[in-house]
Amino acid sequence: MQPLIDEVKIKQLMKEALIEALQEQKDIFHDMIIEAIEDIAMTNAIRQGENTASASRKEVFDILKG
């Protein structure tokens, strides 16, 4: 019978694999983090908006036009 790999070795291998993936796929992880930050910002904006008065369509577009 082959001996089982111990937990310490498994953890070390997992850490190494994660570090390697992060180094090789920086752009993918960057995009995922940006997406998560945008989702959090949108959630916060929605929560803040729930506690404010409604705005008309014209008011919104006037603000967007500057």
Image (tube, grey):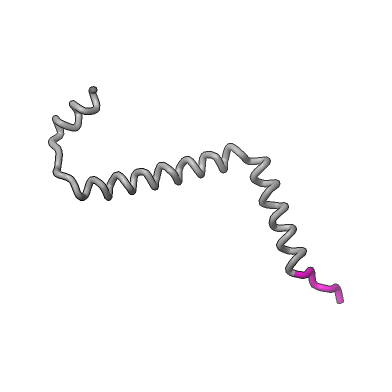
Taking the spot 33% from the left edge, 48% from the top edge, the residue there is 43
Q: Is residue 19 above or below residue 2?
A: above
Question: In the picture provided, is 51 more to the left or to the right than 3?
Answer: left
Quarter of the image for residue 23 reads top right
In reply to whether residue 3 is colored magenta, the answer given is yes
User: Residue 47: image x %, image y %?
Assistant: 27, 50
Quarter of the image for residue 62 reads top left
- Predominant secondary structure in magenta? loop
Q: Quadrant of the N terminus?
A: bottom right
How many discs mark residues in the rendered view? 0
User: Residue 28: image x %, image y %?
Assistant: 57, 41
User: Residue 26: image x %, image y %?
Assistant: 61, 39
Q: Is residue 47 above or below residue 65?
A: below
Question: In the picture provided, is 60 more to the left or to the right than 47?
Answer: left
In reply to whether residue 16 is colored magenta, the answer given is no
> Depth check: 35 or 48 in front?
48
Taking the spot 68% from the left edge, 48% from the top edge, the residue there is 19
Quarter of the image for residue 2 reads bottom right
Question: In the picture provided, is 45 more to the left or to the right than 57?
Answer: right
Q: Is residue 21 above or below residue 56?
A: below
Taking the spot 24% from the left edge, 27% from the top edge, the residue there is 64
Q: Quadrant of the C terminus?
A: top left
Question: In the picture provided, is 28 more to the left or to the right than 21?
Answer: left
Magenta region, residue range: 1-6
Residue that protrudes farthest toward the bottom in the picture: 1
User: Residue 53: image x %, image y %?
Assistant: 14, 44
Residue that protrudes farthest toward the right in the picture: 1
